Amino acid sequence: MDSTKRCRIRLDNLQLWPLRYRWRVNLEKSLAIDPELVFLESIDSTNLELGRLLAASSKPDLFAIVAAQQTSGKGRLDRTWVSEPESSISLSILLRPGDEMERRLIPLFIGSMVSGALSKMTRVTARVKWPNDVLIKDKKVCGILSELTEHGVIVGIGINVGKQEGAPETACSVSDFSQASFDDVLSEVLFQIRTGWTKWMVMSNEFALQVVRDSSSTIGSEVRAILPSGEEIIGTAVSIEPDGRLQIQGADLYQLSAADVWHLRN
Ligand code: BTN
């Protein structure tokens, strides 16, 4: 863990405390949504840090930590995730699913909530590419890594807010479409997740599945999928199943639970 740059500021009440990073991080709006939010200027990974906090003491549902920089961010399929200061939001949230189906839908559902928040901030429709990349105009603006622990599901959300040095052509950032600040984006994301999760908890899993299907840019697309085994599948994505698996009609009917997916055309 990078202890030298680590600075945890826990805000126990609605006191408006302007937190300053080099990138003028001010959490005024976010604290109005989540007064318990823990802010870290720099950490190895917010998912790792939330895991460590949980090992030390229990935390409530929707407990969230956010960092302005990660030094060893984790991506899907054991990749690294670059989140430099002045360019990205790294957020991890604890969710406690009631059953196995809820657990499987969580990453997709949170992707839908983030896409709603980013659509609102940018006024451009953001959609979710299965399993849970949020895209704007077919470019990735956010990645989600969901990890199951004995205390619940840790959902890690990385959002490109500003332009990142050396970012690939396939990536975009909120700043390509909007002047929204770190605080604007974070507070809207927290609001959408809290509201959506609360609604899901009083409704059925069918509600969550519908939300997930409605926000998916993958359903209906011609796709190429590479499974963790290396096998390639080409076909039409026809549905997302109640357990979150992607159904592809190709040479056969396939149900994928993990894969890298490329949209060939819509
Ligand atoms: C991906 O697209 O591969 C998923 C990237 C997930 C990155 C986020 S940033 C906050 C949280 N902490 C991490 O170490 N990873 C996730």
Image: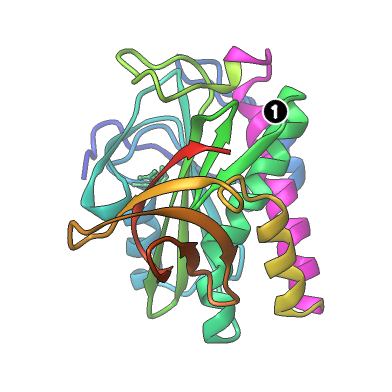
Q: Nearer the viewer, residue 41 or 161?
A: 161
Rendered residue at 46%/14% (across/down) = 163
Rendered residue at 63%/44% (across/down) = 114
Q: Tell me if residue 17 can be seen.
A: no
Q: Is 120 located above or below residue 53 in the figure?
A: above
The quarter holding residue 84 reads: top left
**To which residue does mark 1 refer?**
184
Q: Is residue 189 magenta?
A: yes
Residue 252: percent from left, percent from top = 39, 69
Residue 171: percent from left, percent from top = 43, 24
Q: Given the current orientation, which residue lies at the most extreme front position?
A: 251
Colour mapping:
rainbow
Residue 76: percent from left, percent from top = 32, 51
Q: Which residues are magenta?
A: 176-202
Quadrant in the picture for the N terminus: top left
Quadrant in the picture for the C terminus: top right
How many numbered circles does the render carry? 1
Q: Is residue 247 magenta?
A: no
142 sits left or right of 17 in the view: left
Image quarter for ligand 1? top left
* Magenta span: chief secondary structure: helix
Q: Look at label 1 and name its amino acid.
A: Asp
Rendered residue at 49%/22% (across/down) = 172
Q: Nearer the viewer, residue 207 or 35?
A: 207
Q: Is 1 located above or below residue 104 in the figure?
A: above
Residue 74: percent from left, percent from top = 29, 47
Q: Given the current orientation, which residue lies at the most extreme left position?
A: 229
The quarter holding residue 7 reads: top left
Q: Is 30 located above or below residue 78 in the figure?
A: above
Q: Is 22 located above or below residue 70 in the figure?
A: above
Rendered residue at 27%/42% (across/down) = 44
Q: Residues within 10 Å of mark 1 (few under 14, many from 20)?
A: some
